[in-house]
């Protein structure tokens, strides 16, 4: 009976579909199958989704009712613009802002001027129609941006310049559109200009100044609820789009500015970033591409020579003018032909703003049906052309970038993260993921050390649960993770043995000794703390971390370096990690160091042509560390470079650094760095013979004296 009812239901289904359940099911199967099928023919998946939209839309087989997926389509467009702002390398963006302005000027004025000539003297439009259609030529939509993102070229200067130019030209066009609509309605007066200017200033201030403040506060207060983080980001994106529309411009401008505002709060290696990209690429962006295809009506080409002529002229004008803008940008800045083609591919697609401009003009009677239909054909052809060009040029650019990367050291990068408690796991893993080179294929190694005693069997199940949680958390970023468990006499021995067996290059430790009991601190002062013991047996770079709030809430990274730090073996290694961390968390970098150290860092930046904004502060004496407190705010990450005894940058003041930092910066995020060393040869390190013989003996005598006093106190207590 149920089977018969199901068959009857299928027979009774009428097209176009109106029920959201079959509509959603059909669209999901299209999103799944279209890229798979077209990949066999080496056709970009974007084109497959657009063609599928043409087939199921009102101008195709009328399978889905018109307007049924407009909500998801609009959300997808906003998502593309948001991701473009979120994935920008802000350092490169600020560095190339003048180039973005130049490209924005080219891609706005060249299509506008050429379009004006064509529309006025070839198509014989009136002035208002000429201005409207000419401004439509100047717009473009980053339809092909997901292709660039998938190819991993979004940080290339060509992509950065193209994205920056997109915002400039679309903003200018939408302002012109507001002026045209105001003129058509007879409202183009002084009050109109004042209202438009004030609303744009207020809107930009709210997005770029207030949104980061709210975001930083939210991420600090709500630390562990990852679902709330994702919903919070989505809410800000759509709020920004709504505020943009209130200000008189399209919502895509607000979504892009929201991406810029949250760029520094969402590290690219974080689980949150992975969730944002996954949701967009899986749902919102495909829905937008399908909705674009549903607008296309190829039957307009059969409505007579006038429609065909207008469609051909508009499409040719759109592609030629955008190519000229990319060409002149290439000549201006010496880009390669491949970079020029990437810029052209990204900027040649017309969709969102183009539809907004033309529909408003059509509804106001400024243009006729032939121009509207010609624009729809223009959208199809430019989206196809832009996708093909971006796919082809993007692959070439990705290969060029891969071949031009500097040769890395023979030893592969391996990061070990000893974990003792689940509550401290996530911030340590976040830090490890941020300092790990994203181009290396080696996994992160979470480590659990179980002390070999009578309770070892009872501790192992709990340890396994902690390791499972660590693997799941790091796996949310699509990073490789390999959990490691060791049973050893003590924690420090377990860490040392794991570091040797796995050939570890970096060890990320939690600040484990600061909460120890009085007895543990007493015996730690005699026999050495866990950190002391690890430092004596692990010679790779060690990061000792004390995190009170998420790293993405960091506003400034303050690095304090002792004199002679540049002579240590691991100097360049940890400097690279700090540069990478600064980029990941989007924080400004202030380095307090000696003049010679500053010169060494500057030489390194120049040699590898790195774009890092650094504010140097002369700092000659590590004993004056507390004088820097006035330059450190509550949202700053404090990183201090320490040193092992006997090394060139060692100072006795560094011995008490962990406790000193905990006392004077109790609410700050702190990282103490011990650079990589070889097993120390005191004579080669410059230690005098008398120091070599007397200093260790004096230390041992002092320790024995402390031990004797402790034993006497224990015996007295028993009596």
Image (cartoon, rainbow, N blue to C red):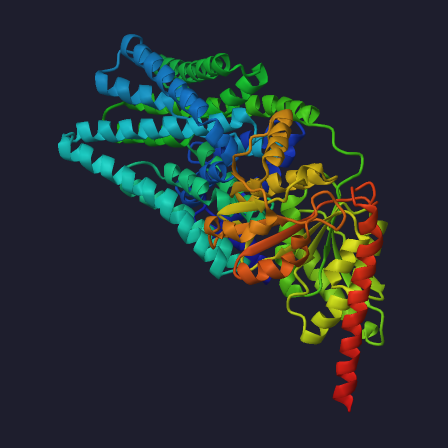
The residue shown at (44%, 25%) is 100
Quadrant placement of the C terminus: bottom right
The residue shown at (81%, 54%) is 537
- Residue 703 visible in this rendered orientation of the protein: yes
Placement of 342 over or under 691, stated as above or below:
above
Q: Position of residue 8 (x, y in %)?
A: 53, 54
Quadrant placement of the N terminus: bottom right
Q: Nearer the viewer, residue 81 or 532?
A: 532
Instruction: Describe residue 173's horizontal placement relative to residue 349 as left or right.
Output: left
- Residue 26 visible in this rendered orientation of the protein: no
Residue lying furthest bottom: 719
Q: Nearer the viewer, residue 542 or 46?
A: 542
Residue lying furthest front: 690
Instruction: Describe residue 59's horizontal placement relative to residue 465 as left or right.
Output: left
Residue 441 figure quarter: top right
Instruction: Describe residue 703's horizontal placement relative to residue 299 as left or right.
Output: right
Placement of 577 over or under 48, stated as above or below:
below
Q: Position of residue 649 (x, y in %)?
A: 69, 44
Placement of 361 over or under 117, stated as above or below:
below
Q: Position of residue 453 (x, y in %)?
A: 85, 73
Residue 341 figure quarter: top right
Instruction: Describe residue 18's horizontal placement relative to residue 423 as left or right.
Output: left
The mark tally for this picture is 0
Q: Position of residue 78 (x, y in %)?
A: 43, 40
The residue shown at (52%, 29%) is 144
Q: Nearer the viewer, residue 463 or 586?
A: 586
Residue 591 figure quarter: top right
Q: Nearer the viewer, residue 44 or 456?
A: 456
């Amino acid at each position: 009976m149920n089977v018969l009812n199901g068959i009857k239901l299928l027979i009774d289904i009428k097209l176009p579909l109106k029920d959201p359940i079959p509509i959603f099911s059909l669209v999901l199967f299209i999103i799944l199958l279209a890229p798979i099928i077209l990949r066999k023919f080496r056709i970009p998946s974007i084109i497959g989704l657009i063609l599928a939209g043409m087939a199921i839309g009102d101008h195709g087989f009328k399978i889905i009712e018109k307007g049924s997926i407009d909500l998801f389509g609009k959300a997808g467009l906003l998502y593309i613009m948001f991701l473009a702002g979120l994935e920008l390398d802000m350092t490169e963006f600020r560095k190339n802002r003048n180039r973005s302005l130049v490209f924005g000027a080219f891609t706005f004025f060249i299509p506008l001027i050429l379009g004006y000539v064509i529309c006025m003297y070839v198509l014989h439009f009136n002035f208002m129609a000429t201005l409207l259609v000419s401004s439509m030529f100047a717009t473009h939509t980053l339809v092909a941006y997901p292709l660039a993102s998938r190819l991993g070229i979004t940080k290339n200067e060509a992509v950065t310049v193209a994205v920056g130019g997109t915002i400039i030209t679309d903003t200018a066009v939408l302002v012109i559109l507001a002026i045209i609509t105001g003129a058509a309605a007879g409202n183009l007066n002084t009050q109109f200009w004042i209202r438009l200017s004030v609303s744009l200033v207020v809107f930009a201030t709210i997005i770029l100044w207030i949104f980061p403040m709210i975001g930083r506060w939210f991420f600090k207060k709500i630390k562990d609820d990852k679902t709330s983080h994702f919903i919070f980001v989505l809410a800000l994106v759509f709020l920004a789009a709504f505020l943009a529309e209130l200000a008189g411009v399209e919502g895509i401008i607000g979504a892009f500015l929201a991406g810029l505002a949250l760029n520094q709060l969402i590290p690219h290696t974080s689980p949150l970033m992975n969730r944002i990209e996954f949701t967009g690429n899986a749902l919102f962006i495909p829905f937008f591409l399908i909705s674009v295809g549903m607008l296309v009506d190829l039957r307009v080409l059969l409505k007579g020579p006038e429609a065909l002529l207008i469609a051909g002229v508009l499409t040719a004008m759109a592609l030629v003018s955008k190519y000229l803008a990319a060409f002149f940008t290439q000549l201006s800045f010496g880009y390669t032909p491949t970079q020029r083609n990437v810029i052209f591919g990204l900027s040649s697609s017309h969709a969102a703003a183009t539809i907004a401009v033309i529909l408003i003009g059509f509804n106001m009677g400024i243009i006729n049906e032939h121009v509207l239909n010609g624009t729809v054909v223009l959208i199809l052809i430019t989206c196809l052309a832009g996708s093909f060009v971006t796919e082809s040029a993007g692959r070439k650019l990705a290969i060029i970038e891969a071949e031009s990367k500097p040769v890395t050291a023979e030893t592969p990068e391996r990061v070990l993260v000893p974990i003792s408690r689940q509550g401290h796991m996530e911030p340590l893993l976040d830090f490890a993921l941020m300092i790990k080179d994203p181009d290396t294929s080696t996994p992160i190694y979470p480590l659990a050390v179980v002390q070999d005693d009578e309770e070892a069997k009872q501790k192992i199940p709990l340890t396994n649960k902690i390791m499972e949680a660590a693997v799941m958390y790091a796996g949310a970023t699509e990073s490789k993770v390999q959990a490691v468990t060791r049973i050893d006499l003590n924690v420090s021995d377990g860490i040392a043995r794991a570091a040797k067996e796995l050939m570890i290059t970096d060890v990320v430790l939690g600040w484990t000794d600061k909460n120890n009991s009085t007895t543990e601190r007493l015996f730690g002062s005699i026999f050495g703390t866990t950190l002391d013991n690890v430092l004596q047996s692990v010679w790779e770079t060690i990061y000792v971390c004390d995190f009170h709030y998420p790293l993405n809430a960091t506003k400034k990274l303050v690095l304090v370096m002792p004199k002679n730090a540049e002579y240590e073996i691991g100097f360049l290694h940890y400097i690279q990690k700090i540069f990478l961390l600064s980029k990941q968390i989007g924080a400004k970098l202030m380095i307090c160091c000696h003049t010679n150290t500053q010169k060494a860092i500057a030489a390194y930046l120049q040699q590898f042509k790195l774009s890092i904004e650094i504010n140097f502060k002369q700092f000659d004496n590590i004993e004056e560390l507390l004088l820097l407190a006035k330059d450190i705010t509550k949202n700053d990450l404090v990183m201090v470079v320490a040193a092992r005894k006997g090394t060139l940058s060692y100072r006795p003041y560094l011995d008490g650094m962990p406790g000193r930092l905990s006392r004077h910066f109790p609410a700050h995020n702190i990282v103490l760095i011990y650079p990589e060393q070889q097993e120390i040869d005191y004579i080669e390190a410059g230690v005098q013979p008398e120091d070599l013989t007397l200093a260790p003996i004096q230390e041992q005598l002092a320790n024995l004296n402390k031990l004797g006093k402790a034993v006497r106190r224990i015996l007295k207590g028993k009596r």
